[in-house]
Amino acid sequence: MLALDRVSKTYPNGVEALARFSAEIKQGEIIAIIGGSGCGKSTLLRAIAGLDRASSGTVTLDDEAIASPHAKIGIIFQEPRLLPWLSVADNIGFGLADLPAAERRAKVARALERVGLGDKAQAWPRELSGGQAQRVAIARALVPQPEVLLLDEPFSALDAFTRRDLQDHLLDLWADTRPTLILVTHDVDEAVVLADRVLVMRPRPGRLFDQIEINLGRPRDRNSPLFENFKRSVLTSLDRSLDRSVPDRDATQGPGQAMWW
Amino acid sequence: MISDAPVLQQSSEPAESAAAASRLSRYARPVLGLLLPVTLALGWELVVWSGWSNGRLVPPPSRIFTTITELARSGELVRHITATLWRVGLGFAFGVVAGTLLGAISGYWSLARRLLDPTVQALRAIPSLAWVPLFILWLGIFETSKIALIAVGVFFPVYLGVMGAILSVDRKIVEVGRTFRLSGFAMIRRILLPAVLPAYVVSLRVGLGLGWMFVVAAELIGASEGLGYLLLDGQQLGKPAQILAAIVIFAILGKLTDWLIEVASAPFLRWQDAFGRAKGA
């Protein structure tokens, strides 16, 4: 289980990006974090990844505090961030340097097949399309079999068709080992397609505003009325989170903070 | 699919003509570059041959060529070229080693950069030839002072190139290394080194160019052999053909050594997605 306990982040310039964010995320759960700009979504993700340290509060994975990048936590960024000097296969195997070469090759080959790029093993990253490059990034993050996979707006730079395709593909890959997925997005559709639970954040300072359970079976039909209903409730919550006249209603906030209004 | 046919025809024609154009340009491009110098050389040859000019101060190409072959036959040429190559090689080696080490340290540790870089930049502001009298006093008139001068010339571009390249490595790529828990040596070997390589090769080529410049300066100041000595000897004895012969050989050697760096580094830079590659230049 991944536990976030009152995680706060204040940047050196005094901006309070994240204030007392608490959540518990079960192993294998798919979480979407959604919110207006500047609500601290990415800050939160970077704290979980161990790339930045929280100013206060703790991130624990299976009772282990996370303060630096961890083997069980993988991350996929908005851009593929492939290493341009490595072939596609070597990019995917980047996190497997400790394994014997034969085992590494086998795993990379399997991952390449799995993301449908078996014929691109020896290609350079510059020869890939945006969608292909992001597939390679997904394979690179998944091949060390992390328990938690963080995704920071991973499909936002892609066109609508490719995005849908990759969303389905991600779920397919997720089913192999069922890692916990935490997906930061600003696409309501994407959140409802993928997530078991949508966390809505509100900005200045970034904090948790609302949680919406998506009780929909998989695969999800993007055109079903039920899907539309969930989309509407996420949108409503998102609208309310940006409306300053609406007070925080989340009970996980400290009692002192809840009292001031 | 009737509509396909004209489309196919249309698309194949430009493709063919493009291939033909690229075939043509593969040979045409170097020829085009040679057109101007060859015309000038032939023109001057003709002018001297027909007696419009005696070509004493500006010898025609044939006379320069004769001078080179004469020097080669007597074994003089090999001796001078060896001496010069040896100086450039040693000076380049020292300059590259020092520039790479200090540049890497300054690029990697910000404390070292704050300590070191202002001094290096101040030294860089000194025209390198100003060191000559001091080097001669310190290191003598023979090889050591010459090699030191060349090394100084090579050092600065390499130092700047390495430091700048490390400082401008994409933070996002470094972050990828961090998420895979690379640290220290592994981060340098797997992320920083490949990332700085293109800029490093450029700085080596710039450094080598300066090395050739400074070897001339060093050999003009006082040498009994070397291509620079041939220049000076040609001036003092009034042999312009010898001066031009030395210049031609400098040009050939400079281009050749530069090409060696380019060829040696090419296998490591195949991944580059650069403008020059797309143009096939």
Image (cartoon, coloured by chain):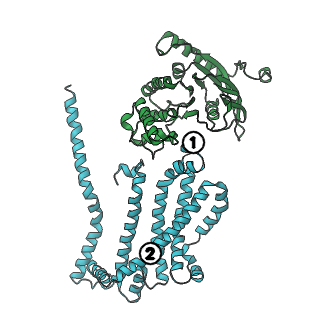
Task: Give the crowd class for mark 2: few <14, some 14-19, many >=20 residues within 10 Å.
Answer: some
**Residue at 21% of width from left, 41% of height from top?**
B13
How many labels, in total?
2
Residue in the picture at 24% in, 78% down? B45
Say which chain tag 1 marks: B
- Please tell me which of labels 2 and 1 falls first in the chain: 2
Viewer-nearest residue: B188 or B162: B188
Please tell me in which quadrant of the rendered image residue B179 appears. top right
Residue A142 left/right relative to A88: right
Q: Name the residue under label 2.
A: B86
Dot 1 alpha-carbon crowd within 10 angstroms: few under 14, some 14 to 19, many 20 or more: some
Vertical relation: B144 (above or below) A145: below
Q: The residue under label 1 is which amino acid type?
A: Glu
Front residue of this view, candidates A62 and B102: A62
User: In the image, which disc is placed on residue B175?
Assistant: 1
Identify the chain of the residue marked 2, using the numbered disc in the image.
B
Helix, strand or loop status at disc 1: helix
Q: The cyan chain is which one?
A: B
Up the image or down, B204 lies above or below A18; here it is below
> Residue B44: x percent and y percent?
26, 77
Instruction: State the hue of chain A.
Output: green
Viewer-proximal residue, B111 or A116?
Answer: A116
- Which quadrant holds residue A110? top left
Return the x and y of residue B95 as percentages of the image width and height: 53, 68
Q: Residue at x 56, y 66 (%)?
A: B98
- How far from the left and from the top, in percent, is residue A240? 64, 19
Q: In which quarter of the image is the N terminus of chain A?
A: top right
In the rendered image, the quadrant that contains the C terminus of chain A is top right
